Amino acid sequence: MQVVSELIEIPNNHNPSVEYIEGELTKRNINPLRWAVVHVSDRIYTVSVANLKE
């Protein structure tokens, strides 16, 4: 396995939750080891993700 750091942009639903963010990551075929919201705008959450790739 390899860990790849990525910045992912997710639509801002104005109701951030673990379930919402992890659901959006899963839709993008991302297997997160860890993630953190690093920037918020009116439209986008920018999430830093450590993605586990096989």
Image: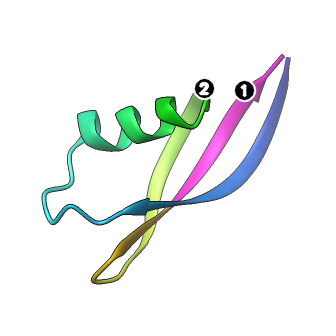
**Quarter of the rendering containing residue 16:** bottom left
Rounded to the nearest angstrom, the CA distance separating label 1 from label 2 is 5 Å
Numbered mark located on residue 52 in the image = 1
Q: Residue at x 21, y 61 (%)?
A: 13
User: Tag 1: residue type?
Assistant: Leu
Magenta segment's dominant SS is strand
Q: Which residue is mark 2?
A: 31
The secondary structure type at the circle numbered 1 is strand
The secondary structure type at the circle numbered 2 is loop
**Quarter of the rendering containing residue 44:** bottom left
What residue range appears in magenta? 47-54
In front of the other: 11 or 47? 11
Image coords of residue 52 (percent x, y): 72, 26
In front of the other: 18 or 30? 30
User: Tag 2: residue type?
Assistant: Asn
Q: Is residue 28 above or below residue 2?
A: below
Q: Is residue 40 left or right of residue 28?
A: left
Image coords of residue 22 (percent x, y): 39, 35
Q: Is residue 21 above or below residue 46?
A: above
Q: Is residue 42 above or below residue 47?
A: below
Image coords of residue 53 (percent x, y): 79, 24
Quick check: marks 1 and 2 in contact, CB under 8 Å? yes
Q: Is residue 21 above or below residue 15?
A: above
Q: Quadrant of the C terminus?
A: top right
Disc count in the image?
2
Q: Residue at x 36, y 62 (%)?
A: 11
Q: Residue at x 57, y 37 (%)?
A: 28
Numbered mark located on residue 3 in the image = none
